[in-house]
Image (cartoon, rainbow, N blue to C red):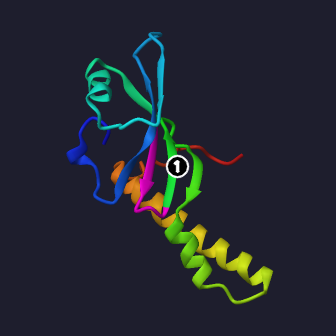
Amino acid sequence: WLGDPSSRPSDLQLGDQVELKAKGDDGVLRARQVDLDSDEIQQLLESGRQASKLAISLEGRLSFVLHDDLALKSLRFGDALIEEADHADDGDDALARLETDFILMAQALSDDVTRLLEWLGGETQREPTAQQDT
């Protein structure tokens, strides 16, 4: 997605931070508050560096940093999702508000992780092992 913007899903937007690693021990380049579609970033990718961390936003509902081990860090729920929770507010009941917030945010996270996995090729199906319980 970083090196080929045309392959990027339409509801995925790049954030403004990336970590690029060179093959071997040639170091790590960390960039924040930069245009990830810039010529400079493209040149670094063409020179063989690979993204090990990439800031992503999905439809403005959820943003995070995707790591090369598929860990999602720095999760932030977007304004649209927070406004949706505000509209579902049942008044002054703090527990009801907490439950509503949790349900909306858990559902958004589940939906977005499912889409992300699809875009990355899906989950690998493992062959059953021939181990016997003893």
Q: Residue at the spot x=67%, y=48% of the render?
A: 133
Left or right: 23 as drawn, with respect to 79:
left
Mark 1 falls on what kind of element?
strand
Q: In the rendered view of the protein, which quadrant contains the N terminus?
A: top left
Q: Residue at the spot x=40%, y=60% of the render?
A: 115
Residue 2 falls in image quadrant = top left
Q: Amino acid at mark 1?
A: Phe
Residue 26 in the image: above or below residue 92: above
Q: Which residue is mark 1?
A: 64
Residue farthest top in this picture? 25
Instruction: Identify the main secondary structure in magenta.
Output: strand
Residue 93 falls in image quadrant = bottom right
Q: Position of residue 77 (x, y in %)?
A: 56, 61
Which residues, given as a range, are shown in magenta?
Answer: 54-61
Q: Residue at the spot x=47%, y=66% of the render?
A: 111
**Classed neighbour count for the residue bearing mark 1: other residues with Cα under 10 Å, few (<14), some (14–19), many (≥20):** some
Q: Residue at the spot x=79%, y=80% of the render?
A: 94
Q: Nearer the viewer, residue 121 or 107?
A: 107
Left or right: 109 as drawn, with respect to 41:
right
Q: Position of residue 11 (x, y in %)?
A: 33, 60
